[in-house]
Amino acid sequence: MVDKGMYQCLVGRLIYLSHIRLDIAFVLSLVSQFIYNPRDVHLQATRRIFQYLKGTPRGILFKRNGNATFNIYTDIILEDLKIKLDGSIKLYYDTKSTINIAHNLIQHDRTKHIVVDKHFAKETCFQKKCNVNLQKPIQDAADSKISCSLLNVEDGINDEACELVSGVELSLGEEDDNIRAYLFKAVKNNNGTGLLLLSDIFGFEDSFNRDFAYRVACNGYNILVPDLFRGNPWTKDQPNLYEQWIARQNPERIAKDITRWTKWLVDEFMAAGISKKLGIIGFCFGGGQVLKVLAQDQGACFGTGISFYGTRMDTLAASDIKAPVLFILGDNDPRCGVSEIENVQKKIGRGSKVVIFPGRGHGFAHRPGSPEEDVDAEQAYVIMRDWLCDHLVV
């Protein structure tokens, strides 16, 4: 059994190093796909990367008398060759996220690695030294595997489409009014869509919640996981105090915090023209909050919602929801009744859907506890992934 924390630490250090060692970027994008569920073969591959780095401390070097040739053209060389450049240099990319980074003034990534590169790209575009244009990718007709960021995901698609993901912790406000969140962004094949993931009672730092968010980001999304409980999530070591704990979670304060982070997502992705609509996902407690958020939103920001076995639902809010909702639950869940969810789905209408997994209890999709639950969790994920793609991407 691989220590997931150790594996994540190793991959994280490699990601840090990849900004100056571009030669490991591709293989790193492969091992990072399994950061939420590593196996021995993945750990061995990661160790081989470290062995490679140890053997090549100065990077890739070419012999002076080697046969390799490199052709580099600059404006000075082109001028000597009597080749005239009219206007700015044209750059072609097959991902809109690259263009968005160059054009968008609102994005404010707080990672020290890419700030310089991003601002350099923006300044260069604003000075009209280059134009960034979209080049549509050419798809091989024989290749049936297409990532969700480009087209609808087929049932047979696996996580081979998963790309390198960056993560950064964010905060809004100061002192007593400070709220935190964690943002996962697909580095490659980013489809520009923003998602809000509302955690279960174990909070935004819980590994199951973050691992799920990481996996969603792998499919091209930008997913924000806010701290709903202001640093005081539920812990399993106090089972007899749950009602007292939940009573201390002020519903108005939680709603206010969600609204603040929703506004941040709007400013970051919608106002900048990157995303037409946002999506919202919730587990358990967060799944119940999905209805409240969508009812308050009235279709202004969110294009769809997904509720996994939501608890403490305000069923009266269903009639105010203006976006389709996907409900995923098990029929053996005492905290989330099937009949109640089906009634809520009928009130919402708008193409909403209920998916029921026979024999499954609470939390099976993001906290599977057996090989059988693993299978259903995977199926639930694919259903969710296709739903997001159909309602937000395609």
Image (cartoon, rainbow, N blue to C red):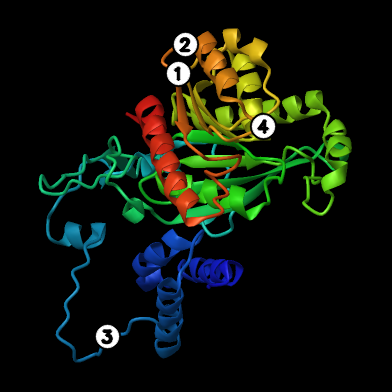
What is the secondary structure assignment of the residue under circle 1? loop
Considering only order in the chain, which callout, 4 or 1, is on the residue closer to the N terminus?
4
- Find out whether the residues at labels 2 and 1 contact each other: C-beta distance under 8 Å: yes
Camera-side residue: 66 or 361? Answer: 361
Give the CA distance from mark 2 to mark 4. Answer: 23 Å
- Left/right of residue 224 with respect to residue 238 in the rendered view: left
Q: Is residue 120 above or below residue 19?
A: above
What is the secondary structure assignment of the residue under circle 2? loop
Camera-side residue: 320 or 354? Answer: 354
Q: Which residue is mark 4?
A: 335
- Judge the density around disc 1: few (<14), some (14-19), many (≥20) Cα neighbours within 10 Å: some
Q: Position of residue 76 (x, y in %)?
A: 24, 60
- Judge the density around disc 4: few (<14), some (14-19), many (≥20) Cα neighbours within 10 Å: few
Q: Which residue is mark 1?
A: 352
Q: Position of residue 91 (x, y in %)?
A: 27, 46
Q: Which residue is mark 3?
A: 62
Camera-side mark, 2 or 3: 2
Which quadrant of the view contains residue 9? bottom right
Camera-side residue: 310 or 144? Answer: 310
Q: Which residue is mark 2?
A: 349
Q: Position of residue 250 (x, y in %)?
A: 83, 28
Camera-side mark, 3 or 4: 4
> What amino acid is at disc 3?
Phe
Camera-side mark, 2 or 4: 4
